[in-house]
Amino acid sequence: MLLQQTQGFRKQFEMRVDDEVLLLNDIQHGEITLPRYTRGTIVSLYNQFKAMIWFDNVLENGSVSLEGNQLLNGLALELDREHFAIAYVPKAFVHAIISEEKAKFIPYFSDDPNKKVELNIRRLSKNGSENLSGYYFEDLLQIISFNFKQWAMHHLADNRISQPYHSNSVIQFLDNKQELEWIFATVTGVYYEFYQNYELNIRGETINE
């Protein structure tokens, strides 16, 4: 459902050869299973809806022998855009806009009138018609990052723990983090790792991602 509703806004996140991507779901190819979040590289493009992606070091039984005794330990797959997200690159998507309707699907999103922009698109409503609005990608990322950080700090502070890595608190934090990253990637078409450089301190213990 999310994929269908966000399709029209992905034109602003143009794919390019050599882009790093991550799978949004498990991919089965013969006896090989590529799990969600497997990283690959775009090696060729057919259009903005399909790409040939190279996945390195994914063969379970070692290298494949090619003519001339060359060894290959990877796999190239042609995948539709809905199966993967582009890895986030700072300042690469500054002109991209996500509609407010789509942004509402992302956990920890909150409306910010100061960052909202008009999309110059109108739709019918009960009162006639209305303008649609959205957020520049970096502004949306900032809003969600801040809200998630606030939740994490309060959640972990309210659940004092002596063994952070084995506590239910941290397990919930990691579960929420993974869910946020997957939904964010599904809605925007861009994978971003939240809290990647942040440390949480609890009773002198440090949790590093």
Image (spheres, rainbow, N blue to C red):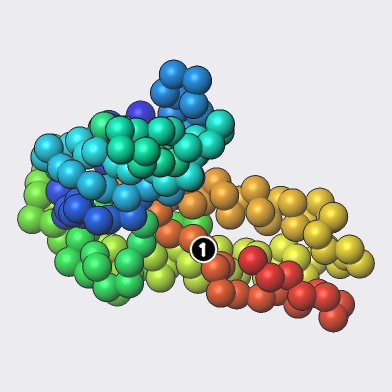
| Percent of width and height locating residue 80 | 26, 32
The answer to whether one can see residue 130 in this image is: no
Q: Residue at x 18, y 44 (%)?
A: 44
> Which image quarter is the C terminus in?
bottom right
| Quadrant assignment, res 203 | bottom right
Q: Is 105 in front, or is 30?
A: 30
> Which image quarter is the N terminus in?
top left
Neighbour tally class for label 1: few under 14, some 14-19, many 20 plus, Cα within 10 Å: some
| Quadrant assignment, res 24 | top left
| Percent of width and height locating residue 179 | 55, 46
Q: Residue at x 56, y 31 (%)?
A: 61
| Percent of width and height locating residue 36 | 49, 39
**Given the current orientation, which residue lies at the most extreme bottom position?**
204
Horizontal side of residue 110 vs 155, given as left or right: left
Vertical side of 184 occupied by 199: above or below: below
- Of helix, strand and loop, which one carries label 1? loop
Q: Label 1, on which residue?
A: 194
Kind of residue at badge 1: Phe
